[in-house]
Image (cartoon, rainbow, N blue to C red):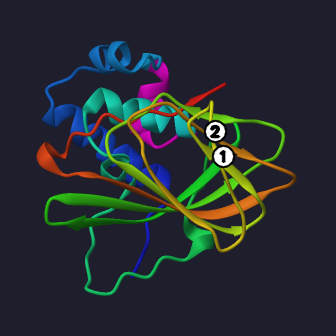
């Protein structure tokens, strides 16, 4: 299996989804809050998107994040080499998208997630559920006013509709993040914003 760099995958998918939606670069810029010049760079494969940028594009286009980041499968075997997956960075979180699974009426996105200490990643909420399995460190995750504290081997699943946060308690955290949402129309409203 030959993999394409994430920037090229994003560029091709972004352009195709924008054109499929009948959107100009100017209209996509207005809907996403991302500068037209930045969008042009992303579509040419020369931009360097953050988590916030990709999630804003997901919202503006009405598609799952994986629709922007996943290359079409060309084989029954899917092998993802971690070193070949580009990292999307946010305020406190680094994500590597490993896989999108289309299961009947549900889409599941699989991420390796690293949470850096000292900052908090904030999401205003989106459709579906989040599943988190911590492999290293202690993570504070969930509603900003009453987050869950989970450590190595702990798992938490919560509805993602309301605001939620991710922060490392004492040091770096490594975890597996699954985003699960209905595939109806392939149009969830997802968002992640830095504090």
> Tag 2's secondary structure?
loop
Q: Main secondary structure of the magenta part?
A: helix
**Residue 85 versus residue 62 in the image, above or below:** below
> Where is residue 84 drawn, in percent x and y?
57, 69
Residue under the image location 72 percent in, 64 percent down = 151
- List x then y, in percent, for residue 19: 18, 33
Q: Is residue 49 visible?
A: no
Q: Which residues are magenta?
A: 37-49
Left/right of residue 116 with respect to residue 114 in the rendered view: right
Q: Is residue 181 magenta?
A: no
Query: Does residue 24 lie above or below 130 as drawn?
Result: above
Residue wearing tag 2: 90
- Residue 119 position within the rendered picture, expressed as x and y whole percent measured from the top left: 77, 36
Q: Quadrant of residue 55?
A: top left
Q: Residues within 10 Å of mark 1 (few under 14, many from 20)?
A: many
Q: Is residue 47 magenta?
A: yes
Return the mark for residue 93.
1
Q: Nearer the viewer, residue 164 or 36?
A: 164
Contact flag, marks 2 and 1 (Cβ < 8 Å): yes
Q: Nearer the viewer, residue 36 or 121?
A: 121
Observer able to see residue 152: yes
């Amino acid at each position: 299996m030959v993999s394409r760099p994430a920037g090229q995958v994003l560029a091709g998918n972004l352009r195709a989804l924008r054109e499929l939606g009948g959107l100009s670069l100017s209209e996509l810029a207005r809907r996403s809050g991302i500068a037209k010049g930045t969008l042009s760079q992303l579509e040419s494969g020369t931009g360097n998107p953050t988590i916030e940028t990709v999630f804003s594009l997901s919202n503006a286009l009405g598609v799952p994040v994986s629709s922007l980041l996943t290359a079409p499968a060309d084989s029954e075997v899917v092998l993802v080499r971690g070193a070949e997956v580009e990292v999307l960075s946010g305020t406190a979180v680094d994500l590597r998208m490993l896989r999108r699974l289309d299961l009947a009426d549900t889409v599941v996105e699989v991420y390796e997630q690293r949470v850096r200490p000292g900052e908090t990643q904030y999401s205003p909420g989106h459709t579906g559920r989040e599943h988190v399995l911590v492999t290293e460190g202690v993570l504070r995750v969930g509603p900003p006013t009453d987050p869950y504290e989970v450590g190595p081997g702990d798992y938490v699943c919560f509805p993602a509709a309301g605001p939620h946060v991710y922060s490392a308690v004492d040091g770096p955290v490594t975890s597996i993040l699954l985003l699960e949402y209905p595939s109806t129309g392939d149009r969830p409203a997802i968002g992640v914003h830095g504090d």
